[in-house]
Image: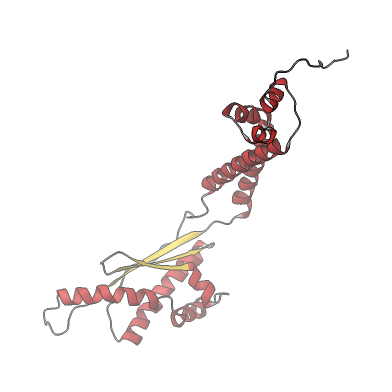
Amino acid sequence: MFSDAVTEIGIDQILRMLRKRFPVIVVVTVLFGISAFFYTFLIQQDVYQAQSTIIVSSTSADSGTGQLTVNDYNLNVKLVNSYSVLCKTDRVLEQVISELQLPLTTGALGDKISVTSAKDTEIIHIAVRDGDPARAQAIANSVTRIFQSEVAEIMKMDNVQIIDEARLPTNPVAPNRVRNVALGVALGLMIGFGLAFMIEIMDRSVKSEEQVTDLLGIPVLGSIPKIIED
């Protein structure tokens, strides 16, 4: 009976617990919020993104018209997937590292590069993220140029055209500092609630007549008042 009463927690008990442990919740939430603020504003570095755009486009030499046929278009769209993989091969990345004298391995450089294509189009976007905006621009343009030459070398096709070269980024794309601080506060709030519940569950002391009645199911016949000395 006693153990069952202890494990049953009503809404009124939860509200009383929250009021009683409110300072614990506030302190934990504030600590996590401050920690997230200092980490994201003072430790995390800005990340910039530079992006170039290319198109896979060629016309059939046999047509004699110099116009793009349906077969040419379908072939170009199919080649986009192959070209997206070729763009990040060691053969291309090693040349980029050599050209720009980068202190990076091909794996580390590859992690900075993302290659995407719009569905069912001939357009490929080459994006580079780096803490240095000028280096991000240089890498993106170098990858684009070397990739274009490698397509002609390996595929024996001259069907890659540069639409937009990467421009110097002026604003960082990461980190999202406001979101990080908000997540820190939310995490602190959840941990604060959890800690408050844990403290309350581990606290087996009886501090009021209402608790005695709730736990034992019997009325309180008398109590000893607390004497405050002047």
User: Left or right: where does residue 165 sit relative to residue 109?
Assistant: left
Q: Position of residue 61 (x, y in %)?
A: 17, 84
User: Left or right: where does residue 195 sit relative to residue 83?
Assistant: right
Note whether 184 is above or below 145 in the view shown: above
Q: Quadrant of the N terminus?
A: top right
Q: Quadrant of the C terminus?
A: top right
Q: How is the image coloured?
A: secondary structure
- The front one of 94 and 75 is 75
Residue that appears at 43% across and 63% down: 50
- The front one of 192 and 197 is 197
Q: Residue most toward the front?
A: 1
Q: Position of residue 64 (x, y in %)?
A: 11, 82
Note whether 197 is above or below 109 in the view shown: above
Q: Position of residue 69 (x, y in %)?
A: 15, 75
User: Left or right: where does residue 21 sit relative to residue 177?
Assistant: right
All told, the count of numbered labels is 0
Q: Is there any visible trace of residue 68 in the rendered image?
A: no
Q: Quadrant of residue 144?
A: bottom left
Q: Quadrant of residue 193?
A: top right
Residue that appears at 49% across and 68% down: 112
Q: Quadrant of residue 66?
A: bottom left
Q: Residue most toward the top?
A: 230
Q: Position of residue 134 (x, y in %)?
A: 49, 64
Q: Is there any visible trace of residue 94 in the rendered image?
A: yes
Note whether 149 is above or below 73 in the view shown: below
- The front one of 107 and 125 is 107
Note whether 34 is above or below 19 in the view shown: below
